[in-house]
Image (spheres, rainbow, N blue to C red):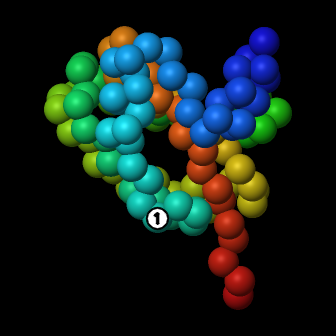
Amino acid sequence: MRFIIILIALLFSSFLVNAQSKQFYEQIEFIPNPNGLMTINVSNIEKGINIRVFNLVGSEVKQFTSKDVYETFTKSFDWSDLPKGVYLVHIQSGSKVGIKRMTVQKKLK
């Protein structure tokens, strides 16, 4: 079941639970994407934030939670330890949910 939800989210580039989550989805920004180093900006935080990263098989590969976030969240993440590919980033704050696609590319040496 989780794989089907992730596949639908990938195809439509977002999985929207309700109108409030649609607005929340639009408040999520990845800078830059694609890259292993990325800053995630999220506005309109209700109470804390939970970020989960899934590969396309549906396995959770990363997780971050903070209960001390209100209004705006900005944090840099280093995803360079992940294999090159496409991932889905599930971001939840209270009842708001947004899923965005992230691409990890390895830099040429």
| Residue drawn at 44 percent across, 53 percent down | 30
The quarter of the picture where the C terminus appears is bottom right
Q: Is residue 92 left or right of residue 9?
A: left
Expressed as whole percent of the image width and height from the top left, the position of residue 24 reads 35, 29
* Above or below, 93 relative to 69: above
Q: Is residue 26 left or right of residue 67?
A: right
Expressed as whole percent of the image width and height from the top left, the position of residue 20 reads 34, 18
Look at mark 1 in the image and give the residue it sits on: 32
Please tell me which residue lies in front, 80 or 40: 40
Q: Can you tell which quarter of the image residue 25 is in?
A: top left
**Callout 1 amino acid:** Pro
Asked whether residue 69 appears in the rendered view, the answer is no
Q: Can you tell which quarter of the image residue 6 is in?
A: top right
Please tell me which residue lies in front, 51 or 97: 97
Asked whether residue 74 appears in the rendered view, the answer is yes
| Residue drawn at 57 percent across, 26 percent down | 15
